[in-house]
Amino acid sequence: MKKKIGVLVLSYGTPKSLDDVEAYYTHIRRGNPPGAEQLKELKDRYEAIVGGVFPLRENTDRQVERMQEELNKFNLPDAEFVCYQGLKHTDPFIEDGVRNMAADGITEAVGIVLAPHYSTMSVGTYIKRAKATAEEVGVQMSFIESYHLHPKLIEAFSQRVSAKLDLFEETGAKRDEVKVLFSAHSLPERILTMGDPYRDQLLETSEAVAAAAGVTNWQFTWQSAGRTAEPWLGPDVLETMKDLSERDVRYMLVSPLGFVSDHLEVLYDLDIEAQEVAEELDVRVMRIDSLNTDPLYMETLAECVLAECRKGA
Ligand code: FEC
């Protein structure tokens, strides 16, 4: 019988329903419930995207399912992979995922986050929580911290950038008139004094995708900063759009590189909020399609897990 290797696939998580938004938001706020106004504002954003549906849940389910298929295509003679979900802010929580593996008799596992770039405030916290539970329940785990320059990930993003540049061309814009705006979730500015690799990794991915897509007219910008008092990394994409429009840039292609799924931060922050600003500024803004279960992305994840297993062999 083949040995089972657990793969803990870590993702942000989304509420199950509008009634669950308060508990979810309270978890994000480390146990502090949001005020009534904050809660309403978040519920309104979810309602605006697709009438109260939470696309991240289904997208994560599909990614995990497809990833397990991809991993077992390696057809290892002595091992098979079994994927488990571990979510940051809702159930199955990260800790549940690790416990589920242990309950199924798994003693060896690899963890990978559905986010390509490492920050102590993002991927670092997923890993810390998984490690603590793994030690408690006796699962030996190793983790992939980042995969932001994996050639297949770069290829998947660059194909998406090229496809939208083609669309701009078909509708009358010249390719080099389009400013490509690579973006990612902002984090508090203090990560920079902590020596965090997040910003540098994002710039590396941006450079690699631009080179692969033959794009020279690009810049990096942040998006989706949290609603807290401390300063967050900027400039925000909305500010960048205003600034570019003042410099007569009429065409922009927003290309989120830190997200791998359709979810609130893409479908609301970019498709609704940024589009409203684009209309006000009278500029044309498109967004690249999200990776979701793109075969190249699934192969990226599977190859990273296999490489991690071989390190330990
Ligand atoms: O579709 C969905 O339901 C979930 C969309 C979603 C994703 C996501 C990814 C990241 N976040 C990151 C950092 C922070 C920090 C805070 C924070 C707050 C929120 C709130 C919502 C939310 N995030 Fe998120 N994030 C998503 C959703 N995020 C909702 C709360 C309301 C708001 O501020 O908008 C601030 C927490 C604090 O108070 O300290 C920090 C990072 C990522 C990308 C990496 C990853 O996926 O883990 C980094 C998707």
Image (tube, grey):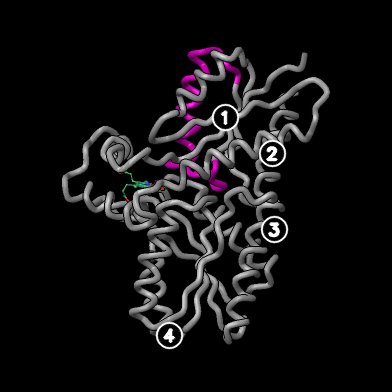
Question: How far apart are the alpha carbons under marks 2 and 1?
Answer: 12 Å
Q: Position of residue 222 (x, y in %)?
A: 43, 61
Residue picked out by circle 2: 302
Residue at 32% from the left image edge and 37% from the top image edge? 24
Q: Which residues are magenta?
A: 114-140
Residue assigned mark 4: 247
**In which quadrant will I find the C terminus?**
top right
Which amino acid type corresponds to the residue marked 1 in the rendered image? Leu
**Tag of residue 8:** 1
122 drawn magenta: yes
- At label 4, which amino acid type do we have? Arg
Q: Quadrant of the N terminus?
A: top right
**How would you rate the neighbour count of disc 2 (Cα within 10 Å): few for under 14, some for 14-19, many for 20 or more?**
many
Mark 2 residue element? helix
Kindly report the distance in space between the C-alpha atoms of the residues bearing marks 4 and 3: 31 Å
Which circle's residue, 3 or 2, is located before the other in the chain? 3
Across the whole image, how many numbered discs are drawn on residues? 4
- In this image, 164 relative to 252: left or right? right
Residue 155 numbered mark, or none: 3
**Location of residue 228 with respect to 15 vertically, above or below:** below
